[in-house]
Amino acid sequence: MEETRRHERVRVDRQVHVHSASGIEIEARMVDLSVGGAGLVYGAAAEVGTLLELSFSLAIRGELRPFSIKGVVRYSHLSTDGYRFGIQFLELTREDLQALLTFVLQTKVIRR
């Protein structure tokens, strides 16, 4: 089955602080990123439909930029390095959207 995505994603490897509406806070590893969402890996599964807030930083044009973005878990499954779950971003500001797009484009260029 061929996968279709609305947004181009890039591989990343960075820590992300995850906060749930129920008060649970964890540190997970972000493994891919697009303007529409992120792929995370953690030691336990995430329930599909769970609302989360992700806090992380990205180097954009040589400067570290912090993000705090709300999202929803769209899938969760066991993978070789832990549970992988996909987050769809919700309510992005124009500034966050532009910064994410810049990061994706600069990362894509660097890795060619």
Image (cartoon, rainbow, N blue to C red):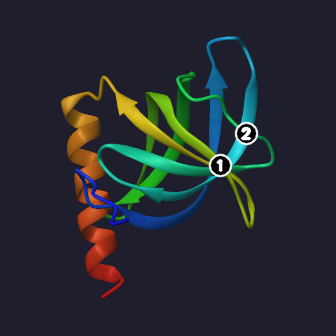
Which of pointers 1 and 2 lies earlier in the amino acid sequence?
A: 2
- Residue type at numbered disc 2: Ala
The residue wearing badge 1 is 77
Q: Quadrant of the C terminus?
A: bottom left
Residue ID at (79%, 42%): 44
Residue ID at (19%, 32%): 94
Vertical placement of residue 104 versus 77, above or below: below
Residue 4 at what x, y percent from top left? 27, 58
Q: Quadrant of residue 26?
A: top right
Vertical placement of residue 57 versus 55, above or below: below
- Residue type at numbered disc 1: His
Residue 1 at what x, y percent from top left? 38, 65
Task: Give 83 or 17, whichever is nearer the viewer.
Answer: 83
Distance from the alpha carbon under mark 1 to that under mark 2? 7 Å
Q: Quadrant of residue 92?
A: top left
Residue ID at (29%, 47%): 35
Question: Which secondary structure lies at badge 1?
Answer: strand
The residue wearing badge 2 is 45
